Image (spheres, grey):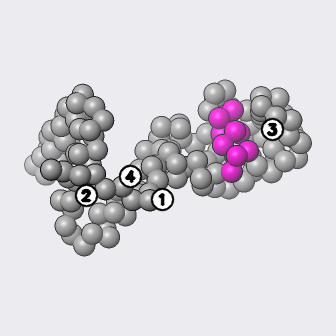
Amino acid sequence: MHRRFLFRGFKSSHEILENRLGVLEREVMGVVWSRGAASVREACGRLGSPVAYTTVMTTMDRLFKKGLLARRKVGRAFVYEATATRDELEGAVATELVHSLLQRHGGEPLPILSSLVDAVSDRDRALLDELERLIREKRRTSDRERSR
């Protein structure tokens, strides 16, 4: 019988992303993702609660310095755009997590890969089929690159 063992405190890529950004940073990213681009003034108007203009300006500058927002000067103001979609950002966090787990295991990735397959199959059969399709696609791409 296969029993699931859950680590206390182990977080998904979504949770890691949520915890790495402050509440206002997440709200600002949500505004920028929904609008495509926003100035500080536009972000202030779209936030759920009233926040000082200078606070939003500082937050957007911090997100720019973290590499999550890009900015361009339009007149006297900056207009900010997300450097990645929410899904791309969560995917990057998940990829980094998997890479770090594979490196820590010292060259024996089978238990980690087996856990991934178990988690996917527990969630959704169609997702398991998609994982299989992705593996076949990756093999074809890899084979083509080797034959060059």
Q: Find residue 112 and name its label.
A: 2
Q: Is residue 77 left or right of residue 136?
A: right
Which residue is disc 1 drawn over? 9
Give the number of the mark in front: 4 or 2. 2
Residue 55: x percent and y percent?
84, 47
Q: Is residue 145 visible?
A: no
- Amino acid carrying label 2: it is Ile
Q: Secondary structure at mark 2?
A: helix
Q: Which residues are magenta?
A: 22-32
- Say if 30 sits above or below 14 in the image: above
Q: Is residue 95 left or right of residue 36?
A: left
- Amino acid carrying label 1: it is Gly
Which residue is disc 3 drawn over? 40
Give how far apart the Cα atoms at labels 1 and 2 are: 18 Å
Which residue is disc 4 drawn over? 95
Give the number of the mark in front: 1 or 2. 1
Q: Find residue 125 and name its label.
A: none
Give how far apart the Cα atoms at labels 2 and 3 are: 43 Å
- Residue 124, by quadrant, is top left
Residue that appears at 19% across and 67% down: 108
Give how far apart the Cα atoms at labels 4 and 2 are: 13 Å
Residue 36: x percent and y percent?
63, 29
Q: Is residue 146 left or right of residue 18?
A: left
